[in-house]
Every structure is written in structure tokens, then in C-alpha cells.
Image: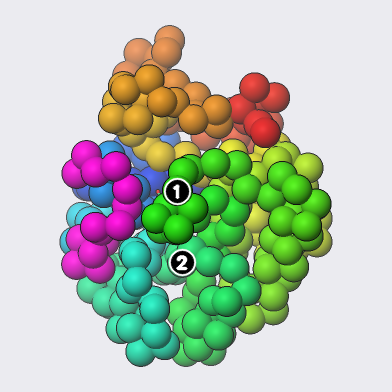
Amino acid sequence: MREAGEKIACLTCYDASFALIEDRAGVDLILVGDSLGMVLHGGTTTTPVTVDQIVYHSRCVAPHLKRAFLVADMPFLSFATLDRALDSAQRMMQEGGAKMVKLEGGREQASIVEYLAVRGVPVCAHLGLQPQFIHKMGAFKVQGREEAAADAMAHDAKVLAEAGADLLLLECVPAALGRRIAEQSPVPVIGIGAGHDVDGQILVLHDILNISPTVRLGRRPRFVKNYMQGAPDIESAIRAYVQEVKGGAYPAPEHCF
Ligand code: KIV
């Protein structure tokens, strides 16, 4: 899709009913994200999410996808050592039906990415805002605003792709940095709050349906758009998201940093 110049429309999903709808609505990539700890369980962070929970929800989703590509998220500390990373990825692919795993972190995760990649595990490396680091960072905020931080992130992206990552995900970075990383990257770059000039977009399902605790409590992140507004039903809302990603209408300047 990247080579063909077609934007990749990605969305999170955690159950069978939404898997069917998202697949039918044309979502290209579905992520069983550890965001389930916040949107399904009502937590304030993703820290408590376990491998068992990701595997369970992946199993709910996987059988219902005819065309979408399924990615499962490696939760907090599930890839802290090479052995744990391999065990977690094995469970997500063999039990959960995922075709790729996603893990948060920069160049310090390169050895884990390589260890998985050479064993046949496709990996998406998640850079920028890394919600699993919330207790180190103290707050969810835009990353890579300063030149040194932007340079470090661009370098991390290069190192992770060289280590074997097949996909990069960039969360909450200035649009200019999103463009810079996408331009230099040999693999597709998916953004969430990373501007327009990346290869695809991802959002959290419950955010675009305007039902997540975050948006209900009035803490809507800048990059979130309510697709239920004006939509007759959920499938139409998701279809509109896919069309806007493909057509370039989403993200608009007001969704970017
Ligand atoms: O867990 C998740 O849903 C994610 C997305 C926010 C990209 O990582």
C-alpha cells in the first residue's frame, strides 16, 4: 500500500462484533491494543494489562477478519527479556491469531526486535509517546518537540527498522517530525497524532465513536475526531474514518501538533 501511495487505515478493536464491522468497513489493520485497559476496563493507565488479556481479545477478533491485518500489543513488561518477549509473541500469534506484535520503546528495544524478527515474528515498533512509560514520564504529552529529542527519535526509528521492525508507529509527535521519520523510513509509518505525512493513521475505536472514558470526561486528545457526529450508525462512522484517512481529509490541521 505504501508503494502504491495508498494510505493505511488502522483502528483498534477488542471483540467479535466490532471486528466484523471494522473488517466490512474497510479497515486495513486492526490492533488489539493495551488501550483496552483504559477503554474496556476503565483504568487510568495501560500498566495493569496482561498478556492473557491481549491473547483473549485477539482470539475474539481474529476469526472474524476476512481482509484486515491483525496486530497484537505487547503489554507492560511482557517483553522485558528476550525469553519473555518470545513467549509473549508466541502466545499472541499461536493462541491469539495475530500476524504481528507491537512493542513500545526506542533503540534500547533493538535487540528484542531483532530476536523476534529473525524467528519469524513481524514487529511494529511504537515510538514517540509511549503510554507504558507513564510512570517514568509523569504525564501523557507530545514527544520530540525539541531538536535533540527529534534527532534522537529519528535515529531510534532508523535503528529499529535496521533491527528488523516491519512497521513503525509514531504517537503524539509534531507533524514535521512525523514527515521526517516517514521520509527516511524503509518501512511504513503509522501515525496517531503524528501529522498528515505518514503512511497511515490509527485511532482508538472508542475514541472515534465518542464513548471512551477519556472523551466522556472531557479529555479528548487533539488528534481524536468524533466520527459518530452526523453518522447514522457505527459502521458508517467507521467507513467515514477509513475514507477520510484514504482521501487525506483526516488528520486535518486541527488534529496535528
Ligand atoms: O494500545 C493502543 O491502542 C495503541 C494505540 C493508541 C496506537 O497503542
Is residue 44 rendered magenta in the image? yes
Looking at the image, which residue is at 23% across and 73% down? 95
Can residue 200 be spotted in the picture? no
Magenta stretch, main secondary structure, is: loop
Percent position (x, y) of residue 198? 70, 47
Q: Are marks 2 and 1 in contact (CB under 8 Å)?
A: no
Query: Within the image, what quadrant is residue 55 found in?
Result: bottom left
Asked if residue 167 is among those painted magenta in the image, a careful observer would answer: no
What quarter of the picture does the N terminus occupy? Answer: bottom right
Is 186 drawn above or below residue 130 in the view shown?
Answer: below
Q: Which mark is residue 113?
A: none
Q: Which residue is mark 1?
A: 138
Write down the residue under mark 2. Answer: 103
Q: Indicate the amino acid at tag 2.
A: Leu
Task: Please identify the quarter of the rendering in which residue 74 is found.
Answer: bottom left
Q: State yes or no: Cβ of the residue under disc 2 lies below 8 Å from any atom of ligand 1.
A: no
Helix, strand or loop at mark 1 = loop
Asked if residue 112 is positioned above or below residue 34 in the image, the reply reads below
Q: In front here: 199 or 113?
A: 113
Q: Which residues are magenta?
A: 41-55
Residue occupying the point 26% across, 49% down:
37
Q: CA distance from mark 2 to mark 1?
A: 20 Å
Q: Earlier in the sequence, mark 2 or mark 1?
A: 2
> Could you say where residue 118 lies in the image, as x and y percent from the top left?
53, 89
Can you tell which of label 2 and label 1 is closer to the viewer?
1
Residue pictured at 42% horizontal, 52% vertical: 134
- Quarter of the image with the C terminus in it: top right
Tell me if I can see residue 107 in this picture.
yes
Q: Nearer the viewer, residue 147 or 208?
A: 147
Question: Eyeballing the image, is 63 above or below 196?
Answer: below
